[in-house]
Image: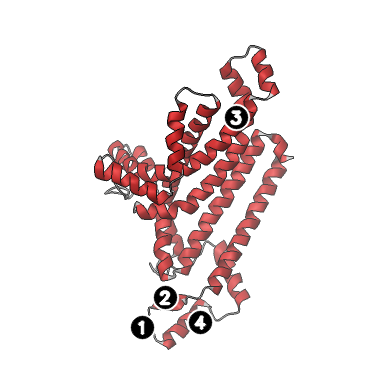
Amino acid sequence: MTRFILRRLGAAVILIFVLSAAIFVLQAISPGDPVKAYLGANASPAAIAAQRAALGLDDPIYVQYLRFLGNLVQGDLGVSLRTHRAVLTDLAAFLPATVELVTVSFLTALLLGTLFAVSGALRWPGGAVFRGPLLVLATAPPFLLALGGIVLFYAQWHWLPAGGRGEDSTSPTGLLVLDSVLGGSLPRAGDALEHLILPAVVLAIAPSIAIGRILRASLDATLRSDYVRTAQSKGLTSLTVLRKHVVRNSLGPAMSMAGLQLGFMFAGVVVVEQIFSWPGIGNYLANSIPVSDFPAIAGVTLVLGTIYIVANAVVDVLQAAADPRLSA
């Protein structure tokens, strides 16, 4: 198992290295001029030339790449051309809001996916009433779900806010709900949760179906297996059979799909954050693209890609822990 974990961590490090190389190449061949974007359209040629020299953009490409890697190892992602702050400072300000949103969305997707799978595999009476609307909602694109949710829950029924994180979104760690609960401010935590519900549910609908379908197929196959029938013939209760034989042997494929969906959630958060004015890195990225803010775009891409790679590595390790045959 230790060798498997080390091998998986090594593969993750190589993938992150490849990702950083791809980001640098895309940044280098991009047609935009970062110096003009930084100094403005009215900058003189002399000022542009001086700034290019100061940033090392006249150096050979391999020198620039080695400098890029060196800065990356030291946690230096450059300076945003739009905000004129260090990209790392911007990410530290915006990333917690995205982490909070995706965490709540992921937990929601796991809950809905599990209900979808179990209600179908165990033939719960009335389960179709829950699964049918969920399947219909999952076919709609996120922006349509978001607009529908705003129209119904904000404009028509006035149950939930339409966007933002609330009037006071400052907190020590940026995780507003957690900080409010730990600080004993339950009304503030409730307000933060109200602002989270719509974007989190919109982000969770499609992944919940993907996880639920895989888990249901796995549960169906396990329930029809010989060892489960043998366990039932021994007189074990249904709950014991589920706990000891069915659930553990059915989780592997669902865990793999959950890891993939977690990565997709971070990648797809841009649209949801834009619609709901959520102050996360998706919004930060969307505002950086129109002004060709390459350091910011590269920083966000690297962070999202690293999260995706690490999430899949963690899922592989968890799968191997659940089924040691996978680590052989």
Residue type beneath disc 3: Leu
Q: Tag on residue 42?
A: 1
First-in-chain label (4 vs 3): 4
From the image, tell me which residue sits under label 4.
Answer: 53
**Mark 2–mark 1 CB contact (< 8 Å):** no
First-in-chain label (4 vs 2): 2
Q: Is residue 122 above or below residue 40?
A: above
Q: Tag on residue 37?
A: 2
Element type where label 3 sits in the image: helix
CA gap, disc 4 and disc 2:
15 Å
**Which-is-in-front pick, marks 2 and 3?**
3
Q: Tag on residue 219?
A: 3
First-in-chain label (4 vs 1): 1
CA gap, disc 2 and disc 3:
55 Å
Question: The C terminus appears in which quarter of the rendering?
Answer: top right
Q: Could you say where residue 17 lies in the image, as x and y percent from the top left?
A: 62, 60
Q: Tag on residue 212?
A: none
